[in-house]
């Protein structure tokens, strides 16, 4: 009786319970580098220092970057197979290009523009 019940439950389980695993991509890893303020828009802007160090990750081809926790600015989205990306967080935009272990990116907000030079870290 127990074997019949177990078999009936096993056969009635949905077949689509397979959880896909994200494959690693050519750009996966931890990236870090320096952003240089290139433009302040308006007086009294809160762009922060002239240079700032930042770090983010790419996993399974998805960028995850908590850009500025003070203002709730974070970016999340895909990096293309050619290394390009164009992400938005509210009125903020992050665009860039990765080539091998190097990346250039531009952060644009209504108040500031910052240019980043990043490298993939070897942990």
Image (cartoon, rainbow, N blue to C red):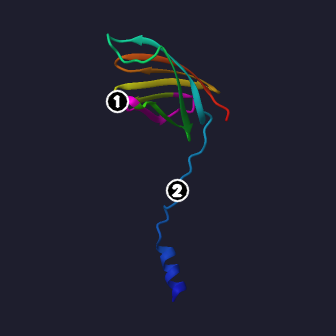
Which residue lies at the image location 59% right of the left edge and 34% below the top edge?
30
Residue 99 appears in which quarter of the rendering?
top right
Asked if the magenta segment contains residue 73, the reply would be yes
Relative placement, left or right, of 79 versus 73 is right
Check disc 2: other Cα within 10 Å, few if <14, some if 14-19, many if 20+. few
Which residue position holds label 2?
19
Question: Label 2 to label 1, Cα distance in Å?
Answer: 31 Å
Q: Can you say whether 40 is above or below 123 in the image?
A: above
Q: Say which of marks 2 and 1 sits in front.
A: 1
Decide which of 86, 89 is in the foreground and name it.
89
- As helix, strand or loop, the secondary structure at mark 1 comes to loop
- Return the mark for residue 73: none
For residue 110, what is the image quadrant? Answer: top left
Q: What percent of the width, then of the height, locates residue 58? A: 55, 36
For this orientation, the residue located farthest to the left is 43
Q: Are marks 2 and 1 in contact (CB under 8 Å)?
A: no
* Residue occupying the point 46% across, 73% down: 12
Work out whether residue 49 or residue 95 is closer to the camera in this orientation and state it. Answer: 49
Residue beneath disc 1: 90
Lateral position of residue 90 relative to residue 13, left or right: left
Disc on the earlier residue, 2 or 1: 2
Instruction: Give residue 101's position: percent from left, percent from top.
Output: 64, 27
Disc 2 secondary structure class = loop
Start-end of magenta stretch: 70-84
Is residue 58 inside the magenta stretch?
no
Residue 84: percent from the left, percent from the top? 53, 27
């Amino acid at each position: 009786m127990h074997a019949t019940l177990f078999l009936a439950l096993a056969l009635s389980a949905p077949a689509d319970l397979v959880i896909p695993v994200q494959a690693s991509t050519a750009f996966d890893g931890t990236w870090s580098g320096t952003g240089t303020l290139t433009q302040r828009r308006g007086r009294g802007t809160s762009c922060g220092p002239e240079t700032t160090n930042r770090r983010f990750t790419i996993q399974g081809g998805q960028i995850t970057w908590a850009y500025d926790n003070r203002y709730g600015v974070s970016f999340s989205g895909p990096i293309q197979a050619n290394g390009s990306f164009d992400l938005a967080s509210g009125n903020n935009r992050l665009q860039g290009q990765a080539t091998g272990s190097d990346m250039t990116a531009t952060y644009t907000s209504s108040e500031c523009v910052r240019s980043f030079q990043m490298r993939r870290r070897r942990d």
